[in-house]
Amino acid sequence: MSSRRYAALTMVRDEDFFLQLWARHYGREFGRENLFIIDHNSQHIPPGDVLGPGANIWRLPYNNPVSDPTGENRAFDDERRRCLSRQADALLAYYDAVVIGDADEIWVTDAPGQSLRAYLDALPEIGMRAGMGIEMFHDPGTEPPWDPEANIFDQRRFFRYRFLCAKPWLVGERGRELLWHGARGGFQLDGNLLLVHLHSLDEAQLRARRTARQADYAAGRGGKNSRWKDPPDDAVAQVARYAAMAVEPGDMMHHDLLEELFPGHREREFNSDTYARIEGGHARRRMIAVEQFVPDALRKALLDMRFRLPDRYLGKA
């Protein structure tokens, strides 16, 4: 049995719904004592009230960093990423790997019959890894209202592939810098891992969360380009459009897709020397992000395709 130690790290603001799911998933995988939460000045529901006593919570009692004390420049996003990156590096002095993400993101493995921990234990080395990104969404016409006691994939099965969510934020090396949806330097692209975005998991919760976020943004909180400012009705209508799409037949397609796009990616480091970066306004030279290497036409086509998780995911999260 592997003797590796794993930690999970997130940064939250009033994330009671998703924080419960995040803690339940990683608590089962790694033990709740190995979960670390940075509370960025929650105003409504502190993480301690959500998780109870014994949680590892580090509270930041300010909305804005010292570089932008009034919030005028909305430096929230950049400083948040730096905070997570440095905290993960500190944890790697005591852990073999740190799983990083927002509270509405969870890592799972596509390897049949394996938990996330079992899959990571079996790897010769962890390094820094990205998985395929998928975005779950609620189809109210066929799926029931959310049951907080049931497993995620037992009640929600529909998703879209989204390369934006293919973050290399599973880290087993010190000194690595996280950048938005990417990292500085190369990493391993691992199709047996999925980073699952749960933002649109439930229609009622989506509307309530967006309504609260819109009010917070108006009060000067949140990043400059944050979707916090967007109308709740827009988000609900967008998910309704996803639910109206036909379901693609067959099993999941990402293994074949990744091999077609990135031949030999299982044996090669993913970087701008091994694969051709697609030029465009979204390409930041200092950041290596999987989506930067995917043609825009393909990325957009995948967003208009609806898939269903196969039965092997039941009970995984």
Image (cartoon, rainbow, N blue to C red):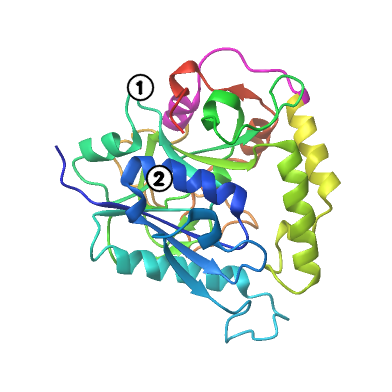
Identify the residue at horizontal 83%, vertical 38% (top origin): 237
| Picture quadrant of residue 57 | bottom left
| Picture quadrant of residue 248 | top right
Q: Residue 166: tell me if it is visible.
A: no
Density class for disc 1 (Cα within 10 Å; few <14, some 14-19, many ≥20) is few
Task: Using the image as rendered, state which of residue 25 and residue 220 is in the foreground.
Answer: 25
In the image, is 27 to the left or to the right of 133?
A: left
In the image, is 104 to the left or to the right of 260?
A: right
| Between discs 2 and 1, the one toward the N terminus | 2
Identify the residue at horizontal 46%, vertical 48% (top origin): 23
Q: Which mark is residue 112?
A: 1
- Quickly name the residue at label 2: 26
Residue 251 image offset from top left, x and y in percent: 51, 16
Q: Which mark is residue 49?
A: none
Task: Name the kind of residue labelled 2 in the image.
Answer: Tyr
- The magenta segment: 244-260
Q: Label 1, secondary structure: give it.
A: loop
Q: Quadrant of the N terminus?
A: top left
Nearer to us: label 2 or label 1: 2
> Residue most toward the top?
250
Between the residue at mark 2 and the residue at mark 1, the CA separation in whole angstroms equals: 19 Å
| Picture quadrant of residue 77 | bottom right
Identify the residue at horizontal 71%, vertical 69% (top origin): 224
